[in-house]
Amino acid sequence: MESEDCMSSYSHHSKAFTKRSKPAKGAKVLTPRSPVWEHYSRTKDNRDKCVCHHCKKTFACPTKSGTSNLAKHLQTCKLYQAWEAGRVKHQTTIGEDGEVRDTRVTETLFREATNEMLVIGEMPLSFVESMAWKYFCNKVKLFKPHSRRTATRDIVEMYVKRKEALKAWFKSNKQRVSLTTDIWVAPTTGASYMVITLHFVDASWKLKKLIIGFKYITDHKGQTISNVLLDCLAEWGIEKIFCITVDNATANTSALRKFQSSFSLLANDAFVMDGEFMHMRCAAHIINLIVKDGLAEVDDNVSAIRNAVGYVRSSTSRLRSFELRVDSGKLTRGSLPLDVKTRWNSTYLMLSRALEFRLAFDKMEAEDRLYNDYFMEFEGGAKRAGPPAMVDWRAIERLVRFLIIFYNSTLVVLMICLESLISIGLV
């Protein structure tokens, strides 16, 4: 009986101890926050015990107590000291200025670079918590990635600091700048936003570009645009202007006239030559208006070509049928692009490529019954334009010779903008 009582008492105490040492079923296990846990792991049998990764010794670590004893052990653990000494060894390199620099990456620098990667790459904040980024950091022995909340807080703080630094620089240097601005309407909400971009040449003669305003506006009136410009420049402490480039909207002409009369009161040298050349019309927008007028004159001819290209690209069987009538070369959907009606440059590319396959289109009209039936259908209450006839091809040939001038002019304007963007760096 005594033996049975002892066994019963032992079993009771053993179960009680097991209950205390193991977490309750369904209980939430908290993630350790202290940095010492990078060097310790709790045992599977008892979460109140942990093992050092370096010397494999076991220590008490009750969940309700601190980790000071674990930190003290690291100060005396020889294996940890050897690991730490080997980890901090680093090389030096010679920088662009000729100075010898430390190549070691600190945790602060790693965190800052990660935040900048998210911003520059326009990546989602959740990427820092993804398995891919954690795997990469572990593979190359980097620091443990921070959370998306920390990244959000860091990025906002970084934005505020850099914005204040830029404001202070503009206010102290009294830099003369040029501006470009336009109004964008959100397609889903219909809300209007005015974007103000600043351009200037720095002390190293490099062209810089900076978005200083993305403002919600209630209407597109000239007075509203003028007020937004004045408020934005006052916020940044800018008092000298070269020119402001806008499109040819009537509201912009009225806005800049009112802006000039108000801004000139700030200083005698607010403008160059009293603002005579302050208002600049956007070259790309002027080209776009000219080309649209030209396309309107041959809209029926362009529609015939567009419908023919759309038919060929609409299915694989139609594309194969068209390819059989191409004299040389292999045809793909990319070889015969379909334009976007609101983008005239895509219309030029479509027409120029269609001219190269003119004979194949003529063979389709002569041999393919389905191709001809397609143009007998009605679209919007009227017969579909096409198939392309001789008069259409001749009109398109003249149009392409006209469009190539403006297409190349647009490329020149875009290349100038691209060269400006390449030279842009962090101020």
Image: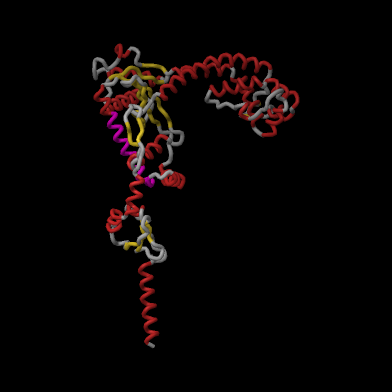
Q: How many marks?
A: 0
What residue lies at 37% left-to-right and 25% top-to-bottom?
A: 209
What residue lies at 32% left-to-right and 23% top-to-bottom?
A: 226
What residue lies at 68% left-to-right and 19% top-to-bottom?
A: 389
Query: Which quadrant is home to the C terminus?
Result: top left
- Location of residue 344 by image quarter: top right
Coloured how? secondary structure
Image spot of residue 294 (x, y percent): 54, 16
Front residue of 251 and 151: 151
Q: Is residue 31 visible in the rendered structure shown here?
A: no
Q: Is residue 237 visible in the rendered structure shown here?
A: yes
Image spot of residue 28 (x, y percent): 38, 60
Q: Magenta residues?
A: 143-166
Figure check: 297 above or below 75: above
Figure check: 206 above or below 32: above
- Location of residue 153 by image quarter: top left
Residue 98 relative to residue 332: left or right: left
284 in the magenta segment: no
Query: Which quadrant is home to the N terminus?
Result: bottom left
For this orientation, the residue located farthest to the bottom is 1
What residue lies at 64% left-to-right and 32% top-to-bottom?
A: 314
Kindly report the secondary structure that dominates the magenta region of the rendered protein: helix
Image spot of residue 425 (x, y percent): 37, 27
- Location of residue 364 by image quarter: top right
For this orientation, the residue located farthest to the right is 367
Image spot of residue 339 (x, y percent): 57, 26
